[in-house]
Amino acid sequence: MSARTALGLLLAVVLVTSSGWAQETGATAPQPTPSPATQPTPHAPPPATPPAQPSPVLTRPQTPLPPPADGGTPKMEVSPLEFRFGEVWAGTPMSREFTIKNTGDGALSTKVQSSCGCTVATTPKSPLPPGESTTFTITYDTKRPGPANKTVTITSNDPQRSSIVIKVEGTVNPVFTMTPSSAISFPSLEVTSVSTQMMRLENKYEKPLSLKLKEGQNFGTFDIELREVEPQKVYELVATTKPPLRMGSNHATVELETSDPKIPPLQVSVFANAQPRVFSTPFSIFVPPNRTESYDEMITVITQSAPQAKVTEARCDIPGFAFEILPPEPQPEGVAQITQRVKVRVPKFEDIPETGGMITLMTDDKAPEYQKLEIKVVRRVPPARPATTQPAAPLAPTTNRPEAPPPTPPK
């Protein structure tokens, strides 16, 4: 019998003996211990079902607050968990007080943030020691009619409830409805335009109300008039532009006071956008370096009201430009603007001087300020890149060899 065979028989005898001993004594044979990577993860017991209460929206903040320095565990309780104010009239003050209590054994830190500027929350005490309570107030601005669906989020260092979202919901009914909308808006006008727009205001309050313009208001480029159509019931707000208008946006806010001092003044915005009667677009033509050959651009001349300003001549102070004046385009029904296009053949980049140039379009308009339209030509040079200096090659290290000693003279 070989040595390997004898060793196998000996191990078999030992295993059989051990198994029999374990069955007789009820002992369990030792099992190999699994590595940490293969050990099953114990499951935590399910949490107890909380009592029924208004369902807050729980979210985990992106940046949780740091744990308390005292090493304890804070626990946040908030009451109430929602702010539902039902139906109210516009301008009615709406606020509610909320309580935060720390029922844990560590200092509770909190931060309160609202979802918009119309919902304002005061700042509660923070940090809050164990067992203490604090209060804060949420106020909703009811000046704007319509449904309210906002939120206020309380972020904390409570490891179990890191944030609570309080819903702010309700409906704000308008005291006066505004037709066509909550603002008076004028379409594109000229700086010399005199135009009138009107808004109808109808009382929807529970009792009759009178309206009047608040004294001391400055409406700038507008004349504002309030007319009473039905006493204490229906009114008309009339806005008329007062030239010269400012080029671009013109705006004014009109405040209307009611006969009930409890209702804050109504606010109506008035807008007007003033543009030249005749203008061209684009305002500039940029020629980039990748234009190695001549190419075509299009200039559009827009006349906002009849009669149309027709292009009679086109020229440029840079040689090499060519122009084709296209016929005026048909005016779509309901569109006041009239357009005409000019096709421009632009030279290549190398032919454009660094100082650029100017394209001039001549029109037959009667107004002198619209008889000449100018468009800049710009040689678009790419920005210079900062010079990258290559680091100098390091000098080779010098090796100072010791000088050879002088020969020893013979004795």
Image (cartoon, helix red, strand yellow):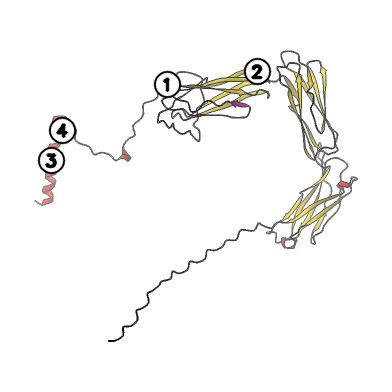
- Mark 2 vs mark 4: give the one in front: 2
- Among numbered discs 2 and 4, the one appearing first in the sequence: 4
Amino acid of disc 3: Val
| Tag shown at residue 68 | none
Mark 2 sits on what residue? 88
Q: Which sits in the foreground, 362 or 79?
A: 79
Could you tell me if the residues under marks 3 and 4 are in contact, i.e. CB atoms within 8 Å?
A: no
Mark 3 sits on what residue? 14
> Depth-wise, is mark 1 or mark 4 nearer the camera?
1
Circle 4 SS class: helix
Q: Position of residue 284 (x, y in %)?
A: 76, 51
* Residues shaded magenta: 119-125
- Label 3 sits on a secondary structure element that is helix
**Disc 3 or 4, which lies upstream in sequence?**
3
**Residue 97: image x %, image y %?**
56, 20
Name the residue that disc number 1 marks: 49
Choose between 404 and 63: the one closer to the eye.
404
Q: How many marks?
A: 4
Q: Earlier in the sequence, mark 1 or mark 3?
A: 3
Q: Position of residue 15 (x, y in %)?
A: 15, 39
- Marks 1 and 3 sit apart, C-alpha to C-alpha, by 55 Å
Residue 300 x, y percent position in the rendering: 79, 48
